[in-house]
Image: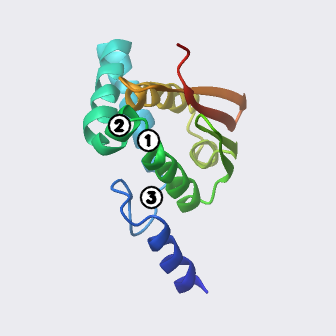
Amino acid sequence: MQDSLEQNADTRFEGLRYKSEGELHRDFHASILDGANYLRDNYGEDALREVLFETGTKVYKTLHEKLVAGDPSELLAWWRYYMDREGADYSLEETETGAVLTVRNCPAMMHLERRGIPGGKGLCTATRMLNEAFCSGSPYEIVLEETGSRSCQQTLRLKAT
């Protein structure tokens, strides 16, 4: 059964450029939080925003380029891939003008809580900044609304004209 799921997942996400394979290292979330806090505390909010902008537009170049071209498919595949990979309790509903990602129990926040690592909301801030970068120069925006201590809704929609 597991082989079947893995084969199906490989087919479903074929062509997705940004995916991690192999063992899942949940401490990645703590590392991201530490890095974001270090940048903000030592160089300021603008430095953190600049690093995440470069990440969102250059590291995730094709995802960004597709959004600029009006194609959200790679972002949606990326969201699905990582939510599935981490076993998140989520739903992703595509709409006529974008999509709504509802995360009912964020795996990153759960991991940080289990490890006793405070400040997990810093990941929400970093996610907002990364989303801004993804959408920079595109017809889209992503609005992140925190709906609980470990839940949020991210709405990909066309920018108001």
Asked if disc 3 and disc 1 are in contact, CB closer than 8 Å, the reply is no
Residue holding disc 1? 71
Q: Of 78 and 109, which appears nearest the observer?
A: 78
State which quadrant residue 4 falls in: bottom right
**In screen coordinates, is 155 left or right of 67?**
right
State which quadrant residue 66 falls in: top left
- Asked if 59 appears above or below 35 in the picture, the reply is below
Query: In this rendering, which labeled residue sits more in front, label 3 or label 2?
Result: 2
- Quadrant housing the N terminus: bottom right
* Circle nearer the N terminus (3, 1): 3
* Circle nearer the N terminus (3, 2): 3
**In screen coordinates, is 23 left or right of 114?**
left
- The residue carrying pointer 3 sits among few (fewer than 14), some (14 to 19) or many (20 or more) residues within 10 Å by Cα, namely few
Q: Residue at x 68, y 50 (%)?
A: 90
- Amino acid type of the residue tagged 2 in the rendering: His
Q: Residue at x 28, y 40 (%)?
A: 61
Residue holding disc 3? 25
Q: How is the image coloured?
A: rainbow
Q: CA distance from mark 3 to mark 2?
A: 25 Å
- Asked if 7 appears above or below 17 in the picture, the reply is below
Image coordinates of residue 136 in percent, x first then y, are 37, 24
- Amino acid type of the residue tagged 1 in the rendering: Asp
Residue holding disc 2? 64
Q: CA distance from mark 1 to mark 2?
A: 9 Å
Q: Of 50 and 114, which appears nearest the observer?
A: 50
- Amino acid type of the residue tagged 3 in the rendering: His
Secondary element under disc 2, as helix, strand or loop, is: helix
Image coordinates of residue 67 in percent, x first then y, are 40, 36
Secondary element under disc 3, as helix, strand or loop, is: loop
